[in-house]
Amino acid sequence: MIEVTSRIQLDEREIKESFIRASGPGGQNVNKVSSAVELRFDARNSPNLPEGVRERLMKLAGRRLTLGGEIVITAQSHRSQEMNRADALEKLLELIRAATIVPKARRKTKPTKASQQKRMESKAKRGGVKRLRQSRPDD
């Protein structure tokens, strides 16, 4: 079990890894070794995620979420496969941890009397400037 938070643990079998060739520098090694990691996690069908966390996770995933509800994370910044595996897993865990934070509900507030008065005064001042700029027919 992989511990995400004190209340959420993921089963290793829920995470699927595949290894692909990384793009970018690496010399001759880049054409021979599949060092990049593509990590897939089925967020929609994971039994270990609470419903609220699942919904927020799917929103946070953005373009990394497939139509089937899988989150796809690719890591290729390191030359070694092991470091890319650790990097991809850490990215997934950070995403899930971010989804566990419940956003604070916004309460509607009315503007204060002082701010309303300040706004009206600035509008009147601006209107006065525009009035002075108008051309008037000669008397």
Image (cartoon, rainbow, N blue to C red):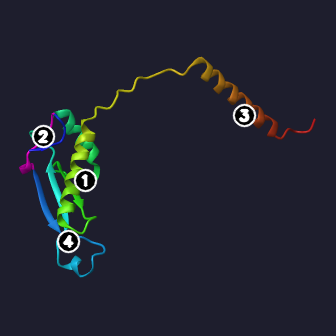
Looking at the image, residue 120 lies above or below residue 132: above
User: Could you tell me how far apart the alpha carbons at marks 2 and 1 are, in whole angstroms?
Assistant: 21 Å
User: Closest to the observer: 17 or 68?
Assistant: 17
Left or right placement of residue 23 versus residue 119 in this view: left
The answer to which image quadrant residue 26 occupies is bottom left
Q: Amino acid at mark 4?
A: Arg
- The percent coordinates of residue 87 (x first, y second) are 23, 56
Which residue ends up furthest to the bottom in the rendered image?
A: 28
- The percent coordinates of residue 32 (x first, y second) are 17, 78
Secondary structure of the residue carrying tag 2 is: strand
Q: Which-is-in-front pick, marks 2 and 1?
A: 2
Left or right placement of residue 55 versus residue 103 in this view: left
Give the labeled residue for mark 2: 9
Q: Which-is-in-front pick, marks 3 and 2?
A: 2
User: Could you tell me how far apart the alpha carbons at marks 2 and 4 are, in whole angstroms?
Assistant: 30 Å
Marked residue nearer the N-terminal end (1 or 4): 4
**Residue occupying the point 72% across, 34% down:** 126
User: Closest to the observer: 6 or 106?
Assistant: 6
Is residue 65 in view?
Answer: no
Q: Which-is-in-front pick, marks 4 and 3?
A: 4
User: Could you tell me how far apart the alpha carbons at marks 3 and 2 are, in whole angstroms?
Assistant: 60 Å
Q: Amino acid at mark 2?
A: Gln
Region in magenta: 7-14
Looking at the image, residue 35 lies above or below residue 116: below
Q: Residues within 10 Å of mark 1 (few under 14, many from 20)?
A: some
Which quarter of the image is occupied by the N terminus? top left
Secondary structure of the residue carrying tag 4 is: loop
Marked residue nearer the N-terminal end (3 or 2): 2
Give the numbered dot on residue 126.
Answer: 3
Secondary structure of the residue carrying tag 3 is: helix
Left or right placement of residue 122 versus residue 91 in this view: right
Give the labeled residue for mark 4: 21
